[in-house]
Image: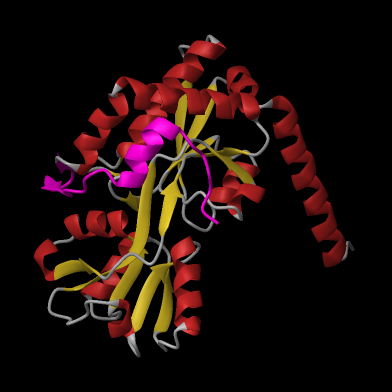
């Protein structure tokens, strides 16, 4: 009988060998040989990556990834390249990228130094800060109003860690609840099982827009911090990262990125045709020139 400890060692060795093989091969070689590229999407990260009324992925990040796939088809000489989709969560997105299940993540992932130890990030394409979604009649307007309340955030996000840290540092004594995704977090607030949902403000606007009664919800408080979003690719795959960066750089320079931004942030979007009215931030405008992939600390 093989001991559990030995099984763990064997599993770790297999994972390391698999990751090493992926690193040696590279994403472009992998997809050229297989004829398939796997794109990861989020089910409720409006307007970046979410499911439309037909159950298929749509959104700002999803369209950017579609442009990237066009370039992959070109450089691999595989116009017949098949696109496979894979739903991911905050908890499993990095492991699934590392083990080769997905090839690129088209979601709403914060580019930070800790994650950069496991994966690489392309040029930052959005900047956001943690705020709170509450019921309009809750009376909650600021962080201090959350003292003794119930606050939910999505498990596996940087926001959850930030809220836990600030709760301890400022002695706010709110109860921090973990939910599986943004849709569940929003539902807990709507049902009164949580007083506030702490998350990136743009995602809060998106989830508010998709609620049955958007007017009963409001986004409040000053941003706790500003963080960049970026498309996630496998670690140490310089050739693929360069392709992704070059695609983004071209879009940012030729105006295509700004047009796409207006479509998803300044115009009516599915499923209810609500306009988020979220103008481009100063940080993002600056990065259209800087083209930086600098992580948050």
Is residue 281 something one can see in this rendering?
yes
Q: Does 78 sit above or below residue 19?
A: above
Q: Does 120 sit above or below residue 147?
A: above
Is residue 68 something one can see in this rendering?
no
Q: Position of residue 277 (x, y in %)?
A: 16, 48
Residue 271 in magenta stretch: yes
Q: Position of residue 245 (x, y in %)?
A: 50, 28
Question: Image point 35% across, 42% down: which residue?
Answer: 284
Residue 26 in magenta stretch: no
Q: Position of residue 193 (x, y in %)?
A: 29, 81
| Residue 281 vs residue 136, the one in the foreground | 281
Question: Image point 24% across, 80% down: which residue?
Answer: 192
Q: How many marks?
A: 0
Quarter of the image with the C terminus in it = bottom right
Q: Does 213 sit above or below residue 17?
A: below
Q: In the figure, residue 19 lies in which quadrant?
A: top right
Q: In the figure, residue 159 lies in which quadrant?
A: bottom left
The magenta span reads 268-297
Q: Is residue 135 left or right of residue 24?
A: left
Q: Does 287 sit above or below residue 152?
A: above
Quarter of the image with the N terminus in it = bottom right
Q: Position of residue 29 (x, y in %)?
A: 64, 20
């Amino acid at each position: 009988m093989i001991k559990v400890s030995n099984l763990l060692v064997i599993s770790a060795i297999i994972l390391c060998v698999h990751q090493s093989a992926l690193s040696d091969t590279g994403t472009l070689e992998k997809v050229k040989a297989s004829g398939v590229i796997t794109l990861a999407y989020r089910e409720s990260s409006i307007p970046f990556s979410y499911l439309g009324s037909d159950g298929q992925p749509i959104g700002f990040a999803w369209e950017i990834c579609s442009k990237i796939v066009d370039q992959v088809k070109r450089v691999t000489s595989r116009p017949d390249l098949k696109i496979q989709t894979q739903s991911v969560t905050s908890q499993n997105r990095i492991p699934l990228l590392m083990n080769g299940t997905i090839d690129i993540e088209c979601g709403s992932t914060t580019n930070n130094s800790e994650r950069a130890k496991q994966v690489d990030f392309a040029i930052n394409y959005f900047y956001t800060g943690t705020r709170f979604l509450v019921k309009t009649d809750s009376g909650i307007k600021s962080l201090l109003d959350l003292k003794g309340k119930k606050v939910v955030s999505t498990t596996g996000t940087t926001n959850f860690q930030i809220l836990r840290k600030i709760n301890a540092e400022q002695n706010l004594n709110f109860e921090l609840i973990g939910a599986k995704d943004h849709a569940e977090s929003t539902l807990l607030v709507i049902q009164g099982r949580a007083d506030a949902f702490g998350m990136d403000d743009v995602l809060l606007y998106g989830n508010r827009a998709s609620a049955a009664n958007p007017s009963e919800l409001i986004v409040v408080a000053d941003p706790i911090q500003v963080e960049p979003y970026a498309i996630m690719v496998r670690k140490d795959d310089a050739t693929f990262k360069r392709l992704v960066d070059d695609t983004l750089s071209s879009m940012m320079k030729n105006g295509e990125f700004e047009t796409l931004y207006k479509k998803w942030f300044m115009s009516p979007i599915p499923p209810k045709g609500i306009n988020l009215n979220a103008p481009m931030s100063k940080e993002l405008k600056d990065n259209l020139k800087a083209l930086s992939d600098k992580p948050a600390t």
